[in-house]
Amino acid sequence: MKFGLFYELQLPKPAGQPQWDPEDEHKIYHDMLDQVELADSLGFDYVFEVEHHFLEEYSHSSAPEMMMAALSQRTKNIRLGHGIVLMPPGYNHPARVAERISALDLLSNGRVEFGTGESASTMEMGGFEVAREQKKAMWEECTREAANMMVQTPYQGFQGQFFSMPPRNVIPKPQQNPHPPLWVAASRRETTMLAARFGMGSLGFGFETPEELAERTNEYYRIIREECYPIGHAINPGLAVLTTFMMGQTDQEALERSANGPAFFSHSLGYYYNPITGGKHQPGEKNIYDSFLESNKKQNTLSAKTGFVKEEDIRKDEPEEEVQRALYRAARTGTAVGTVDRVREMLLTYEENNLDVMIFVAQCGDRKHEHIMESIELFGKEILPEFKERHETKHKAWREEQLSTVEFPINSSI
Amino acid sequence: MARPEQVQDEQLREFFVDAQASMRTGKANEAVESVVSALFRLLELKPELTTEELEPRPGWKMPFLTRWPQLGANFVEGSLAKHEPEIEFVKENFALSEAITYYEFTIETAIKRGV
């Protein structure tokens, strides 16, 4: 199992204030540079950063390509993942995506992971006039063509449903051959299986449990072997899942440091993705962090509880609906949160179920930069080395077995 | 695992086999049509799905069938509330990714219900 960090660049407004302090955005951008630089030096494998627009407090990461370019010069080995690029052409013309991905791949000496997706928030789709019922079709058309642009010399041109362009040589071409590994954001099971059929890695944003992972892994790799029709020119077999992450010398310290981070992550995500609340958001005015604190006072929610909750109690209260369940799990306190022993034990359950990549949500809510740095350091020194060793000796052998009958070219960093 | 071979009802299984064949050859529209037929066969076999509800949050209930992806083969507004699901095609052409999404949702639902 490999490990990564995940960034939304969350920035809750200070409680009771209508706006942020003047240096707040500057600080989270530079904090992220420091955190990823440290993670790289300790051997973390990936950083993934989202692209979101207008989602105040939830995500201030609207231009991840800029951050990735900066990171390419401050890090040596860590893979630079878009998690994800919004592919409908209203957000990004596919030729511009291909150019940026290739340029970053050259700058980083071939370290780019090309994550793709479409987003579903009313604020974003409305802001860029992307039609909800067409966004998946747009994603497919533009992802396929962006991959073609990175490979064809010259790109042969395209007359499509959502964009058209004449033959042009889209340059530069990427360092990786034929193109960087392709991923798709998958918050539902259906999309993980779509990823398999298209030969893409699945960036699981559903906070899946080890049991769910076992079922999905089996089915995902079966489809890769038996029913794959690649969207790109090389496949990237791989399953990644997110989990919240904060470590401490004691469980109590980790919990206190974890604070409201995951709960705010879930609250603000739910706020923007619920068409009712997200659709009525008044730009520049609302303080979502205040409403989050208010909601925590009123409800005895899991997110408001302190201390670890027994796994059976968590499952008992889980919502049945998949997206709501992901939000519920995102708010949990007891995932990769705790001491070295607790976090190692939790990660072993995923390793046993053959997870390829675990991605940590460390930067979220009102967590402190220094606590995130200490957690990265503790994990990197105390836990990461043993997992790295088993990845090389055991997991790679397992993957070879899974993929032994696959005839498509593979470009994967796993 | 969610494969057509696991579907017990012969007619339902055939719809999934047809959808799979269409997807393999890139015929997304035909695949969506087969999956919609599969959905209605599934509702014949398991009519309780039309009244089944999910409770995403305490006190907030929604019909299970609202999980059906709204990608262009949508339920007619109000038809779920009346427990008489009806599909309308709001666009002419579907992408393969949309067909796959409909397929995966429907076959997983069928297999979980043991039909």
Image: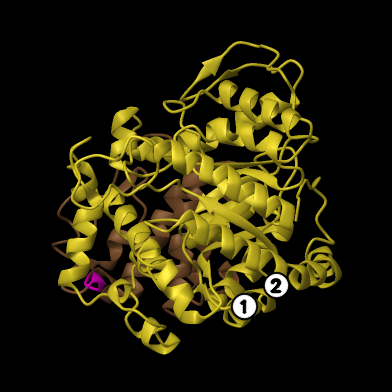
Chain colours: A yellow, B brown
Q: Which residue is mark 1?
A: A340
User: Element under label 1?
Assistant: helix
Disc 1 to disc 2: CB gap under 8 Å: yes
Residue under the point 20% across and 74% down: B58
Q: Main secondary structure of the magenta part?
A: strand
B52 inside magenta stretch:
yes
Looking at the picture, how far across and down is residue A278, in whole percent? 24, 46
Q: In the rendered view, would you say B95 is above or below A145?
A: below
Quadrant where the C terminus of chain A sits is bottom right
Secondary structure, mark 2, is helix
Q: With respect to residue B17, does A46 lie above or below?
A: above
Residue for badge 2 = A382
- State which chain disc 2 sits on: A
Task: Identify the mark nearer the N-term, 1 or 2.
Answer: 1
- Residue A410, position as x, y percentages in the image: 79, 48
State the image coordinates of residue A306 (x, y, percent, origin top left).
Answer: 34, 79
Q: Amino acid at mark 2?
A: Glu
Identify the disc placed on residue A296.
Answer: none
Residue A13, magenta (yes or no): no
Subunit of label 1: A
Quadrant (top left, top right, bottom left, bottom right) of the N terminus of chain A: bottom right
**Residue at image point 48% right, 48% down:** B99
Is residue A245 or residue A374 the one in the foreground? A374
Q: Which residues are magenta?
A: B51-57
- Determine the image quadrant of residue A376: bottom right
Q: Residue drawn at (42%, 61%), measured in percent from left and top?
A: B38
